[in-house]
Amino acid sequence: MTRVFGDPVEVWTTDGRPVRFVWRGRLYSVRRVLEHWVTTRDWWREQQPEAEVTGEREFWRVEATPDREIGVYELRYDAATEGWMLSRVWD
């Protein structure tokens, strides 16, 4: 079962890959990357369609842990805003 979030997270990267992130005040260490993919922005959903919107969204599905319990988390990086979000969590 997955839960959908849209929470901003602070992410540390090494060679472009997430290695740690803070979500809701807890530090998570990425143990391994399960999947990585890139999509283009949904230009048809933009508030100002005439404005040129550039950038892509990178998704990283990772195994991570704040302590001993390992979970699966989906992180999203938006190149246009240079911001990270936690998109999903698997139970």
Image (spheres, rainbow, N blue to C red):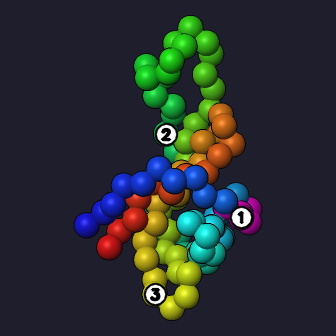
Residue bearing mark 3: 69
User: Which of these two is toward me, 58 or 23?
Assistant: 23
Q: Quadrant of residue 31?
A: bottom right
Residue 31 seen by the camera: no
Q: Quadrant of residue 18?
A: bottom right
Residue bearing mark 2: 39
Q: Nearer the viewer, mark 2 or mark 3?
A: 3
Q: Is residue 81 left or right of residue 90?
A: right
User: How many angstroms separate mark 2 from mark 1 (CA)?
Assistant: 21 Å
User: Which of these two is toward me, 60 or 4?
Assistant: 4
Q: Are marks 2 and 1 in contact (CB under 8 Å)?
A: no
User: How many angstroms separate mark 2 from mark 3 (CA)?
Assistant: 30 Å
Q: Based on the picture, tell me whether residue 21 belongs to the magenta stretch.
A: no
Q: Which residues are magenta?
A: 11-15
Residue 42 seen by the camera: yes
Residue bearing mark 1: 12
Asked which secondary structure carries label 3, the reply is: loop
Predominant secondary structure, magenta span: strand
Q: Based on the picture, tell me whether residue 12 belongs to the magenta stretch.
A: yes
Query: Which residue is located at x 55 percent, y 88 percent?
Result: 67
Query: At label 1, which amino acid type do we have?
Result: Trp
